[in-house]
Amino acid sequence: MERAEMIKKLKAKLTEKRFVHSVGVEYTAATLAFVHGEDVRKARIAGLLHDCAKCLPTEEKLKKAKKFGLPISDVERENPDLLHGKLGAYYAKEKYGVTDEDILSSITYHTTGHPDMCLLDKIIFVADYIEPNRRMIRDLTEIRKEAYEDLDKCIIHILKNTLEYLEDEGTIIDDMTKKTYDFYVK
Ligand code: DGI
Ligand code: FE
Ligand code: FE
């Protein structure tokens, strides 16, 4: 599918703010692809579509995931917004005609990461966090610099801050987030 058609579809599914964020991730992912030697076209598509399922109401995310036969963990059942990655990959394939497995994987895992990520997974995980429309979060200036200099160091930094934030908020932490952190720290 051409970008213009994707944009049209995506705009209808997202709030204005989420759409602007998605385009921000698209361009940020492209710059990371330049620096780290990833396919720029793939990075842009993955960035643009990564949150395509984000704006479904929470309960609807659970309903759709069940309907499509996607695997649902206990944490996801408690916290269905976590399903927007998996669900997003499903829609990317079924509604936006994406067949590339790297793109689908990077959309699936963009929220928690996963151990041993491929380059595109890493780029989308990082681009989501550092794109220019993100409100200023702790260490963002430093994290942005690391993204272009040392991708794995940047991933550890993001996961460390995310885990601390979730702990402070008393939010249930997805096993995958913790596993990813442990994998990259080692
Ligand atoms: O979709 P975005 O807002 O662009 O970013 P995202 O897909 O990284 O989602 C961010 C949200 O996900 C944020 O509210 C924190 C939450 N999150 C990240 N890791 C975990 C988590 N929530 C839970 N419950 N457990 C996690 O491990
Ligand atoms: Fe997301
Ligand atoms: Fe996002």
Image (tube, rainbow, N blue to C red):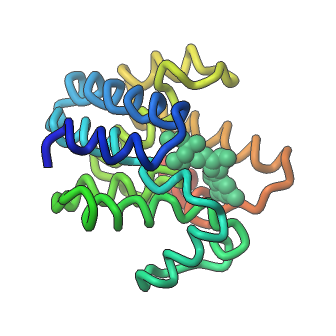
Residue 90 at x, y = what percent?
Answer: 35, 67
- Image point 21% across, 43% down: which residue? 5
Q: Where is residue 34 in the image (x, y as percent from the top left)?
A: 20, 23
Whether residue 41 sits left or right of residue 109 in the image: it is: left
Q: Can residue 186 be seen in this view?
A: no
Residue 30 picture quarter: top left
Q: Going by the image, does 112 lie left or right of 75?
A: left
Q: Is residue 71 above or below residue 173?
A: below
Residue 185 sits above or below residue 19 on the image: below
Q: In which quarter of the image is residue 58?
A: bottom right
Above/below status of 109 relative to 77: above
Horizontal placement of 175 versus 24: left or right?
right
42 displayed left or right of 147: left
Q: Where is residue 129 in the image (x, y as percent from the top left)?
A: 52, 33
* Residue occupying the point 66% across, 70% down: 59
Image-quadrant location for residue 60: bottom right
* Residue shown at 42% from the left, 51% from the top: 52
Which is more toward the observer, 180 or 73?
73
Q: Where residue 154 sits: x, y (%)?
A: 48, 31
